[in-house]
Image (spheres, rainbow, N blue to C red):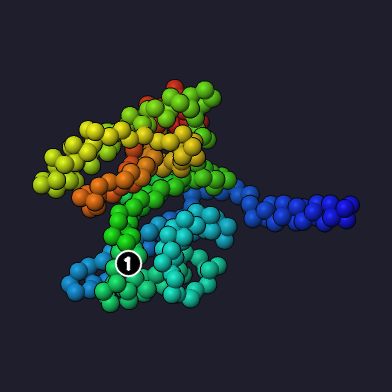
């Protein structure tokens, strides 16, 4: 029995050490060079354009900032052999070759476009937003990293004590309006159906998803930032041409009573 306990403790210690090694402490205070990787091709007279941000720097900085983007473009690499430890720039050329081969052969599964909506970098943070189409559906990916540790910023990181419910309520109200604003992209023949859909449904963030939601941060000007959250909603098939990853935006300064904005240095 004692022997089993010793083995168990040793195993736990090994796992703990392994996890410690995986979480590398960073101290990136300088500006991280950002490049836009852009490529395109044409099939049957239809252009296909793809663009992503690529963050440079040392190995760990690149790994952390580019991780989710790399995961996105390799998601459909089921039939592709590649070095999983290669950086995003190397993977990009493989991705583009794979996309051109698939799309030009008539296979429209997987990603058919990626667009950079914004990249933001200040003394306090790094953030990006990209939209893309995968399997015929529009999607959105946002991420923000706090300097110098390059840790992902979530709502709970900024929310003041005792203000959690207030912050979620404010974003719920703005979510309702953001969904209604999709009407700007709704086809004329679908307007009445969309209006009926929005007016008869309440959209909100679940408490658990809101507490751990990644915040996007877009710079509008000096000391002016826009906070962004996304919420996936289930749209009727009639509106499959809309992006169901709805973006909610609120100016950071408008939330200073509820949020601690000091990590953003504004």
Q: Quadrant of residue 73?
A: bottom left
Element at badge 1? loop
Residue 216 picture quarter: top left
Between 83 and 121, the one nearer to me in the picture: 83
Quarter occupied by the C terminus: top left
Residue, x 89% and y 52% (percent of image)? 2
For the view shown, which residue lies furthest in the front direction?
1
**x%, y% of residue 198?**
23, 36
- The residue most toward the right is 2
Q: Which residue is mark 1?
A: 109
Q: Nearer the viewer, residue 27 or 142?
A: 142
Q: Nearer the viewer, residue 58 or 60?
A: 60
Question: Residue at image x 41%, y 48%?
Answer: 142
- 7 w.r.t. 211: above or below: below
Tell me what residue is drawn at x 10 percent, y 47 percent: 189
Q: Residues within 10 Å of mark 1 (few under 14, many from 20)?
A: some
Count of numbered labels shown in the rendering? 1
Q: Nearer the viewer, residue 82 or 211?
A: 211
Which x, y percent locates residue 19? Answer: 67, 53
Classify residue 115 by image quadrant.
Answer: bottom left
User: 131 left or right of 4?
Assistant: left
Q: Is residue 165 visible?
A: yes
Q: Which percent across, then down, holds residue 157?
A: 52, 35
Residue shown at the point (14%, 46%) measured from the top left: 190
Location of residue 61 in the rendering, given as x and y in whole percent from the top left corner? 55, 55
């Amino acid at each position: 029995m004692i022997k089993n306990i010793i083995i168990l403790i040793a195993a736990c210690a090994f796992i703990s050490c392994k996890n410690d090694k995986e979480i590398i402490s960073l101290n990136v205070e300088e500006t991280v060079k950002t490049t836009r990787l852009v490529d395109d091709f044409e099939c049957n007279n239809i252009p296909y354009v793809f663009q992503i941000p690529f963050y440079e720097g040392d190995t760990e900085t690149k790994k952390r900032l580019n991780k989710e983007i790399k995961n996105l473009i390799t998601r459909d690499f089921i039939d592709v052999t590649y070095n999983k430890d290669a950086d995003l720039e190397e993977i990009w050329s493989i991705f583009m070759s794979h996309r051109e081969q698939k799309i030009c052969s008539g296979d429209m599964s997987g990603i058919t476009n990626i667009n950079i909506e914004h990249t933001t970098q200040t003394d306090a943070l790094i953030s990006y937003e990209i939209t893309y189409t995968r399997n015929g559906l529009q999607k959105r990916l946002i991420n923000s990293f706090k300097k110098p540790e390059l840790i992902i910023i979530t709502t709970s990181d900024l929310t003041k004590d005792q203000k959690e419910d207030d912050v979620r309520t404010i974003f719920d109200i703005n979510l309702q309006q953001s969904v209604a604003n999709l009407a700007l992209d709704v086809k004329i023949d679908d307007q009445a159906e969309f209006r009926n859909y929005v007016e008869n449904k309440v959209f909100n963030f679940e408490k658990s998803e809101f507490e751990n939601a990644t915040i996007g941060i877009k710079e509008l000007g000096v000391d002016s930032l826009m906070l962004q959250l996304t919420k996936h909603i289930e749209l009727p098939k009639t509106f499959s041409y809309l992006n169901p990853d709805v973006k909610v935006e609120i100016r950071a300064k408008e939330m200073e009573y509820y949020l601690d904005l000091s990590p953003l240095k504004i």
